[in-house]
Image (cartoon, helix red, strand yellow):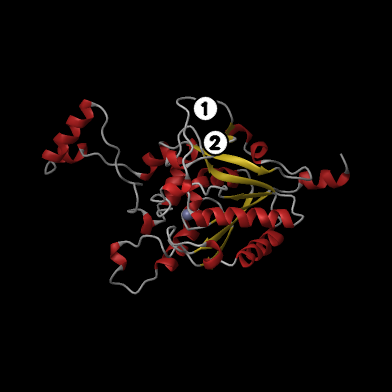
Amino acid sequence: MSSSHVTAAAEQPRAVVVITHPDDELFMSGTLGLLAQSDVSTTLICITRGESGTAPDCLADMNLELGRIREGELIQAVKVLGVQEVHVLGFPDVHPHRFVPDRDWDFDQLCDCIQTIIAHVRPTMVFSHGPHGGTGHPAHKEVYRATQCVLERTSNPAGHYSFAAMTPAPFYTEFFDDDCEFYVDVRRMAPLRALSFGYHQSQLQVGEFLNPPFPRTPRKILSALFGYCFWFTESGRARIPTITLAQFFRRYPFEGFVTRRTPQHGHATLRQILNEYCHTEKLHRGRPRQRVERERDLSVAGRL
Ligand SMILES: [Zn+2]
């Protein structure tokens, strides 16, 4: 091994995570927590402020901008995950049904902004959405394209990983088309993921995050019915199905990744750094998952 390789390999790993909207870090929040525990310093780039997200009713009569609120929520949410630096670029957030990449965003400007931060941080690992955008959001796909473009045109030796790949138990199963190459077991991070996501207060009532699961056994259905009929008693209220964020995250114990580019110059890979948490086996247990065309249904994309 040459001396330059020894120097590079001994260098402290640094990660840059490129997301599109505040709360997209959700797709790898457990991994971010594990990286922080492994002394990997992380810089997060968020392309938009998420101002086209669904605003909670309580904002209607107040002179508050959703984008500014979501930016603040993101900073707090990733702080508890151990992210050390956050850059919110402020590109316009356009609803997925109306987003036209070349019209709404200047691709060269997007690449330049990402490149400036990457040149400053000199990461050994870069994370972004995958080519299909995870949830199918066209802006997610554009961010992947820009991140890859930046890494190709610079001499940066960082590895590139896409998150939101299919795992044995993913969020929104039908919308993830890339089988993951490996997944990170983030079970021990469930409380931290819940704590972090709790900062996205403006989005907690959106989508199905806190919708309780439908009771699946006759006993649980009867118990829930009893609860609704006798909600005025303490015993009844205790039986009404509810879910907390910690319970929600315990149902999704894995985060899937695909290597888009292997790190060069002897830098450690994500799997080497998080070795004890990374797995590749048991990925295809159960029925085969169908590939789903992204463009067919963007109903989920509107929420993430
Ligand atoms: Zn998003």
Number of the label disc, if any, that sits on residue 284: 1
Quarter of the image with the N terminus in it: top right
Mark 1 element type = loop
Which picture quadrant has residue 65?
bottom left
Considering the numbered disc 2 on the image, is that residue within a helix, a strand or a loop? loop
Type of amino acid at the residue the image marks with label 1: His
Query: Cα distance, mark 1 to mark 2?
Result: 9 Å
Q: Is residue 141 left or right of residue 229?
A: right
Instruction: Identify which residue is drawn at 64% across, 65% down.
Output: 108
The answer to whether residue 16 is left or right of residue 5 is: left
| Residue 287 x/y as whole percent | 45, 26
- In the image, which disc is placed on residue 4? none
From the viewer's side, name the closer residue of 79 and 210: 210
In this view, 22 is above or below 187 = below
Q: Nearer the viewer, residue 128 or 193?
A: 128
As shown in the figure, which amino acid type bears the numbered disc 2? Asp
Q: Is 63 situated left or right of 160 in this image?
A: left
**Residue 135 in view:** no
Q: Residue lying at the far right in this picture: please name it.
A: 2
x and y percentages locating residue 69 in the rendered image: 42, 65
Q: Quadrant of residue 70?
A: bottom left
Residue tagged 2: 179
Contact (CB < 8 A) between labels 1 and 2?
Answer: yes
Mark sitting earlier along the chain (1/2):
2
**Is 62 drawn above or below residue 199 in the view shown?**
below
Badge 2 crowding class, 10 Å Cα cut-off, few under 14, some 14 to 19, many 20 or more, is: some
